[in-house]
Image (tube, rainbow, N blue to C red):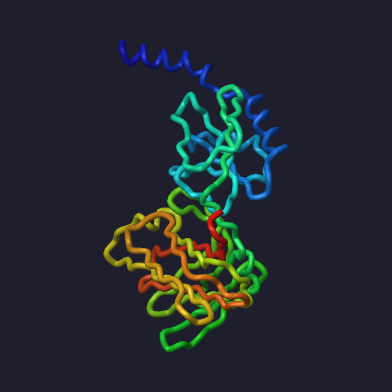
Amino acid sequence: MAVALGCLVFQLRMPSRAVAESDYQAVAQVLEAEGQPGDVVLLYPWWTERARLYLPERIPVVGYQGSDQDPLELHPRIWVLAQPRMEDRYATQNPASGPARTFGNLRLQLYQNKQFRPPRWDARAALATARVYLESADGARADCRWDGRAHRCPNGSEVAVEFHEVKFQPRQCLKFFPPGGSSKLVAEFANVPAAPTVALRAGLIWDRGFFHMPELTPVDLGVQLNGDAAIALTIPVGVEGWLRADGPAIPEGATVRVWSRSNNPAYRELCLELYGLGEVK
C-alpha cells in the first residue's frame, strides 16, 4: 500500500513538474536574441535533453553525465538551463551575468566563464595541411595520403576529424589510433601561430578505457615544438575519461608535432584534441 500511494503521489505531481513547449520556445527566443559567438548552453541536470529540440543550432548544447564539472574552457560564456524543481541549483564558481530568468519550470542563467582560454590555433581545423605518417623505431617514415577527408595510412588506419564519445562526452576530435609495436603515428603541423600554451586533450573512445585485460598496454603521447619535447602524456590501462596536459608557449611559425604509440594497439582507440590556447580570462 505504501509503494502504491507513493507511486500515485509521484504521478499526480508530474504535471506540475513538466515543462511546457511554450517555455522552451521562450528560452530559445532569448538565446536567439542575446547569444554571442562562443557561447554554450549547459543543461542541468544533464539528462534534460528535450531542450535540444528548441534551442538555436548556432549555440552548442552540452549535457552528459558529469558535464556540470566540465570547465568548458573554449567558451567565454555559459548559459545554464536548469529545471530547479527537479535538482539543486547548478553549483559554479563563475560569476553570474545579470539575474536568472524563469520560464515555467525552466531557469536560464548566464555566467562568465572564469576558466575560458581563447583558442589561438586548433589542430582539427589544420588537419588538411598536416603531414601525417607512421614512424618506425629506426626513424623510417611511411606517409599517409590525404584524400580530402582523412589521411589514409599504409597499415589501413586513418586520421580524421570525427565525433566520438569519451566517457559519455561527445567530442569532435582527431581519430588518432596508435599503430602498435614500437611504431608511432605522427602528425606534423607547420607555420603554427604563436600562443601562450600548447594544450593536449586525449582519451580512449567509447568503453575502451574501462577494459582491464592483461594483454592491453598503455598509450603514450607526445607533443614537440620545433623538435623539442613539450608534453608527455600516458593513458594507463583501465583509465577512462578525458586527460589533459598543457605545455609551454608556441613560438610564431613553429612546427608542432604530435604522436601516439602503444605496444598492443587492440582497444587503444584514441581521440585527441590539440590547441594553442591563450591565457585564462
Instruction: Please give left or right for residue 201 compared with residue 149 in the image.
Output: left
Q: Quadrant of the N terminus?
A: top left
Instruction: Please give left or right for residue 81 compared with residue 54 in the image.
Output: left
> Above or below — where is 43 with respect to 75?
above
> Above or below — where is 149 with respect to 99?
below
Q: Nearer the viewer, residue 267 or 88?
A: 88
Q: Nearer the viewer, residue 88 or 240?
A: 88
> Above or below — where is 177 with respect to 80?
below
Residue positioned 51% across, 51% down in the render = 115
Residue positioned 61% across, 73% down in the render = 192
Q: Position of residue 32 (x, y in %)?
A: 71, 38
Q: Position of residue 73 (x, y in %)?
A: 53, 53
Corner quadrant of residue 36: top right
Label tally: 0
Q: Position of residue 123 (x, y in %)?
A: 58, 67
Q: Nearer the viewer, residue 213 or 231?
A: 231
